[in-house]
Amino acid sequence: MIDLDKINEKFKPVNDRILSIDEKFGNELTNELLERIEITLNQFFNEFKEQSSKSFNSYWEKQEYLKKENNKNEFIEETENVPKFISDYKNRKKK
């Protein structure tokens, strides 16, 4: 699922830029830059985790509601409010 070649390809320009800054301005500035990048990434992932958890919980609550309403033992396919990773998974599975 995770393609390391794609990751390396995407991060190569960033890594090259960081090395360039290190050569021009020194280790101290590079370390400060990397600390700021780390803080920003951690904030992003924390926000993503929080939002995706809400979306995921909402999706399953809706499924449980639909299941009870329709009195069925199977989940009902829903087109709105489906978390992206669930819809992506279902689309890949169909191919």
Image (cartoon, rainbow, N blue to C red):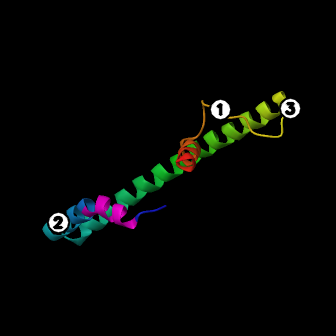
> Residue 34: x and y, percent?
33, 63
Query: Distance of mark 2 from mark 1, alpha carbons?
Result: 49 Å
Instruction: Report whether residue 33 is seen.
Output: no
Up-down relation of residue 13 to residue 53 (above or below): below
Q: Which is more toward the observer, 12 or 82? A: 82
Residue holding disc 3: 71
What type is the residue that disc 2 sits on?
A: Ser
Q: Which mark is residue 78?
A: 1
Q: Which residue is mark 2?
A: 20
Among the two numbered marks 3 and 1 on one chain, the one whose residue lies closer to the N terminus: 3
Q: What residue do we see at 26% from left, 63% from top?
A: 12
Marks 3 & 1, CB-CB < 8 Å contact: no
Q: Label 3's element?
A: loop
Element under disc 1: loop
**Placement of 66 over or under 48, stated as above or below:** above
Name the residue rendered at 71%, 40% in the picture.
60
